[in-house]
Image (tube, rainbow, N blue to C red):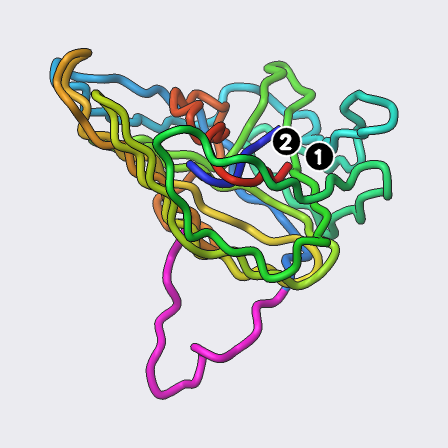
Amino acid sequence: MKKLAPLLLLAPLALGSCGLFNRAPKPVTTAGGTLTDAKVTYDASGDATTTYTAWSGGAGKVMLDLYDYTAKTTVKEGETTLAADGKFSFASLPTPKDSELSPYTEETQPTGCTSTVKVSDKGMRSATAIFRTDATKDVSVMLMDAAGKSETMGQLFYVDRAVKINGKQECKNALVTSVSDINVNFAKGWNWVTYKFTTTRVDDTTPYTVTYTATNGVASNLKWAQNVSSAQALNLNTLPFTLR
């Protein structure tokens, strides 16, 4: 289950005289890119650096999995060829089965949290794509990057209707202030979302802030690689609703 609030982002559209601001989003119909090997290292202050090198996992396949809530298991719904250099492309994306769609669920605000998050249609149902390789190296792969105090990931979501989710949630305790800023506008079908996690944490005793953002699209710095992100908080466990 992935919670959308400390959600989990991105690239604002270049607006202006083109009138793009009012243009309805379009669903994603294909997916692909070039897999890399990624290594994330952290310096003494906790700043991250990601080093990307050529894919070493060999040729094979990339699988697209969805979770089936009736069978209670992950099911392969798509696959495509993975070249030895890491290139792959899904010419089309599968339409989730009814049993692979999860309803929106609203949850009680945790103690210390306030929220202005709004969902335009609470009847929405959604699914999350999970990518993995079947090659010399069998790993979970994703769009990711870690740099400085931030970790970013791209997630492919399916929704059964057009829906907007926006607003902020703030949670505070003696040590941590977490702020989630969500601004996504989904078309019916598949949509990319970029999640970004940033922290000012320096140690276990000094108060710090954690910021999560979720926006449409794919950030330009993201690369396909084995899931090496440590920002598991991006799976969100503090929002007033869940998006799985």
How far across and how far down the image is residue 49, in percent?
24, 26
> In the depicted view, which residue is nearer to us: 170 or 98?
170
Q: Image check: 67 left or right of 1?
A: right
**Label 1 Cα neighbours within 10 Å, binned few <14 / some 14-19 / many ≥20:** many
Sooner in the amino-acid sequence: mark 2 or mark 1 = 1
Q: Nearer the viewer, residue 77 or 51?
A: 77
Magenta stretch: give its range.
Answer: 10-26
Residue 11 horizontal/vertical position (percent): 38, 57
Seen at 50% across and 20% down, the residue is 56
Q: Amino acid at mark 2?
A: Phe
Single out the residue that lies furthest toward the bottom. Answer: 17
Q: Residue at x 38, y 42 (%)?
A: 114
- The location of residue 234, given as percent across then percent down, is 44, 31
Can residue 9 be seen in this snapshot? no
The residue under label 2 is 131
Q: Nearer the viewer, residue 85 or 153?
A: 153
Q: Quadrant of the N terminus?
A: top right
Residue at numbered disc 1 = 64
Tell me whether circle 2 and circle 1 mark residues in contact (CB < 8 Å).
Answer: yes
Residue 15 is inside the magenta segment = yes
Circle 2 sits in a helix, a strand or a loop, which is it?
strand
Label 2 Cα crowd, 10 Å radius (few <14 / some 14-19 / many 20+): many
Rounded to the nearest angstrom, the CA distance separating label 2 from label 1 is: 5 Å
Q: Is residue 219 magenta?
A: no
For image coordinates 70% across by 45% down, the residue present is 126
Q: Is residue 113 left or right of residue 92?
A: left
